[in-house]
Amino acid sequence: MLRGVRGISPHHASYLELLHGRVTGWVILVVSVIITVLAWHTSNVYQEKRAQERFDFRVEEAKWSILKRMLEYEQVLRGGVGLFNASDEVTRNAWHRYVTTLQIDTYWPGIQGIGFARLFAPEHKQALIDQIRAQGFPQFDVLPLGERDLYSSILYLEPFEGRNLRAFGYDMWSEPVRRAAMQQARDTGKAALTGKVTLVQETERDVQPGVLMYLPVYRDGMATTSVEERRRALLGFVYSPFRMRDLMEGILGLGVPDLDFELYDGMAVEPGQQLHATHPERVVKPDARYARESRLELPGGRIWLARFTSRPDFEVDLESRQPLIIALFGMLVDLLLFVNVLALSGQNERVQRKAEEIASALNQAERRYRQMVENVRDIIFQTDAEGHWTFLNAAWEEVSGFSVQESVGRPFFDNVHPDDKERSMAQFAKMMRGELNYLQDEYRGVHRNGELVWVEVYLSVLTDDRGVPIGSSGVLRDVTMRKQVEMVMMRARDAAESANRAKSEFLANMSHELRSPLNSLLILSKLLSRDANLTPEQLESVRVIHESGRDLLNMINDILDLSKIEAGRMELVADELYPDRFVRELLDPFRVFATSKGVGLTCELVGELPEVFVTDGGKLKQILSNFLSNALKFTDSGGVMLRVRRLEGSAGRRVLLFQVEDSGIGIPGDKLDMIFESFRQVDGAMSRKYGGSGLGLSIARKLADFLGARIEVRSREGQGSLFSLTLTEMERSVLAIPSDPWEVSSPAGDGAKVDGALIQEPEEASQPEPLRIRGKPVTVLVVDDDMRMAFSIASGLQKRVEHVLLAANGVRALQELESHPEVDAMVLDIRMPEMDGLETMRMLRADPQYAHLVILVLTARAAPEDEVRCLEAGADGYLIKPASMEVIWSRLEACLMMREGDKGRG
Ligand code: ADP
């Protein structure tokens, strides 16, 4: 009989034989009866309870497998996102390689593919299509066809074969269920699952429900802290499509043979939302003995409802045990014991099998993770609380040059650059003290070969059950390349900026220096042109000298302006401007020229203009003067008109539109942009015919930018041009910033150049009053060793002084005074050879015959104490060069009046 029972091992048999030998028959019988009755009773209760537990266990097991696997899939997608973050451009090939190394068929069964879909706006659609077509897919298109506000398109999907080819180019954004998940992923930065869809991969045969999982890819380097930033930074999605039956079979295998199982998207059993059923032919099995509904919370918060029911197999298996026990009643105890032993050994085997299964599953999971971790290009690491490496993946070897083996156990700061060591150690200590949970920073590391490596670190604290820090884990990314590029660019920018500054400064200084000699040239050529002894040819030459000088001066002024703007030395001065008066004063200087050319110059004020308007009047005048002088220059018949009109500005700000229109030669359409560039004219012959340097408009545009104004130009060749300036009123609070050392601020605030103000154009200004003392014209002696300066002052003085004498130093001055006792005043330089100004003054003041003499000191770049010394030495007034002629006159006049008053009293 014993031998008739299946599966008895010799070991069991001998065990039973041993029992037989030891216990007498009747004891066995009694015990066997008692045990059998008890066993029969408890077995029913026990079996029932065990069946419920077994069912529950199966349910939990299935549920856990699904959840675990979906989380793993999310990790796989995260690896794909990592690929995008690690390199600026992920090629089709790189994507193929990544997915191939994952071996999804082997390690991730059920996943249909891993893809990347790019998001783009309508204006980029054609370029993208062309680009993909050029990659060898002439049929590529964004599908479905048609116009939409925003597109996505599946660009990569690996394995790129079979069903997956059908998805190439598909715009998932166009479909609401997919779009909802994509939007969720985009806004949260996390994985999101769609509801139930039919994948585009489906053919007519074996159609299964599907779902998709998305992870967002943001553009490298863009901020993603807020939802708005994430939307802006979105590049596309890494995603996976799943066919539900394939997926469930991939996850569970044939894992729950005795249970039925249905899966629904959402929280309720709704036939339309069914994702999967192990028994598609019937939705519910009402007579199942065991049934349970359970919710699964998936990545992105999506809920699936799983409904498990026991299957007849499960119940048969259960019931089959009862007849077995009943049959045992009356049997011998050895048989009962044997059965118990058998059950025990069977259970053991099952436990063993289960353990092996779990171990193998663990092994697989471990292999999967390892594969993933090792494939990532970033360094994944862990440290203990002292900062020793406890884990490093393979990427470590490439980035640091050290092997994982030799590094594990060593402190992380051994690999940090000395300059960053202290900071990194302090931050780490802070984390281990529990003061910081998460860290993102950039450090310099040192490669084994001594080279510098820049890494970006993302670090978080590892804690034990009680929350005490026990180490850290994180990711290191090699950003050396990016840093190097940044550094090269920064250096190049610094170099360019400082070169530009140096250039501008040089220009500014140079033009400044050029003006002094030009000054003399202009004045002397003017004086020469009045010489009655010159022949007409000589006069013409003098005129040419004078005009060339003036052109040169204008050009230098322009260059000075330009370099000031470029060196950032231009300042805004908010003035109150009265449009009526401003326009009149603006046009006045042009009237003579217009009349001499026979060209009309008119002005039109349209509508009601504001009474006052706040802006930098000097710069506005400079811009409009340029328009007007160009208009007059390039117009030979007809007229030039200045129009001013008020426009409505936003937010209550006032806006004026200034237009200068002419009927001149016009500008060809293709040259309209070019004329705003420095030194550019419509054609090369221009400057010969019309003069000019090609700088005016480029300065005008820069000044306009500076004022926040806009210049526009319209023109028709041969018919005329229209230059417009749209200017918004400035806020009154915009006031001048202190000026630069070489910039002499203009007291008039109209931008007139006081610097080099000794330049005078004798005939242009109106004739001022001559200076007098005691009713007769004055005689002035100018003493300066720089003859150009002396001439300039002299000719400036000549407008109001009848007799001007010159002397080159103190000794000569004394000689002049001796031979010209009529001298009333002298303008005296201080630094001179032979006898300087101070000494000259002391000598003069020591001599009573010069007591009446007015002495005005005019000195260059003096120290502050110089003024006191000069006044002590006997000066009546003290001025610093450069000073405008008006200032010199008025100071001289004041000194003369004081002397006169003194004399009167005395
Ligand atoms: P410039 O007049 O000193 O040469 P601009 O920068 O002021 O320099 O002007 C550049 C060029 O633009 C001029 O040389 C001329 O060719 C063209 N231009 C400017 N204004 C007019 C205009 N009103 N009519 C025709 N051409 C013009």
Image (spheres, grey):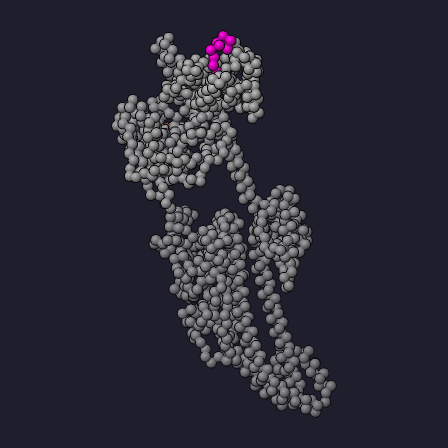
Instruction: Work out which residue is located at the far front of the displayed protein and give it.
Output: 905
Q: Taking the image as drawn, is residue 632 in sight?
A: yes
How many tags in the picture? 0
Q: Is residue 314 left or right of residue 716?
A: right
Query: Where does the image place residue 883, in percent across and percent down from the top left?
Result: 47, 23
Please tell me whether residue 136 is drawn above or below residue 366 in the rendered image.
above
Query: Where does the image place residue 652, in percent across and percent down from the top left?
Result: 37, 45
Q: Residue at x 38, y 64 (%)?
A: 204
User: Residue 679 appears in which quarter of the rendering?
Assistant: top left
Query: Where does the image place residue 736, in percent across and percent down from the top left?
Result: 46, 35
Instruction: Work out which residue is located at the far left of the displayed protein and give it.
Output: 638
Query: Where does the image place residue 543, in percent across and percent down from the top left?
Result: 37, 16
Q: Is residue 551 left or right of residue 363?
A: left
Please tell me whether residue 429 is drawn above or below residue 694 in the rendered image.
below
Query: In the depicted view, which residue is nearer to us: 222 or 314?
Result: 222
Q: Residue at x 56, y 76 (%)?
A: 54
Query: In the depicted view, which residue is nearer to us: 771 or 781?
Result: 771
User: Residue 601 appears in which quarter of the rendering?
Assistant: top left
Q: Residue at x 50, y 75 (%)?
A: 292
| Residues shaded magenta | 816-826
Q: Taking the image as drawn, is residue 246 in sight?
A: no
Query: In the depicted view, which residue is nearer to us: 380 or 487?
Result: 487
For the N terminus, give its image quadrant.
bottom right
Q: Is residue 344 left or right of residue 585?
A: right
Please tell me whether residue 561 is drawn above or below residue 49 in the rendered image.
above
Q: Residue at x 54, y 71 (%)?
A: 60
Please tell me whether residue 378 is drawn above or below residue 588 in the rendered image.
below
The quadrant of the rendered image in which ligand 1 is seen is top left
Query: In the depicted view, which residue is nearer to us: 461 or 260?
Result: 461
Is residue 179 located in the magenta-colored stretch of the structure? no
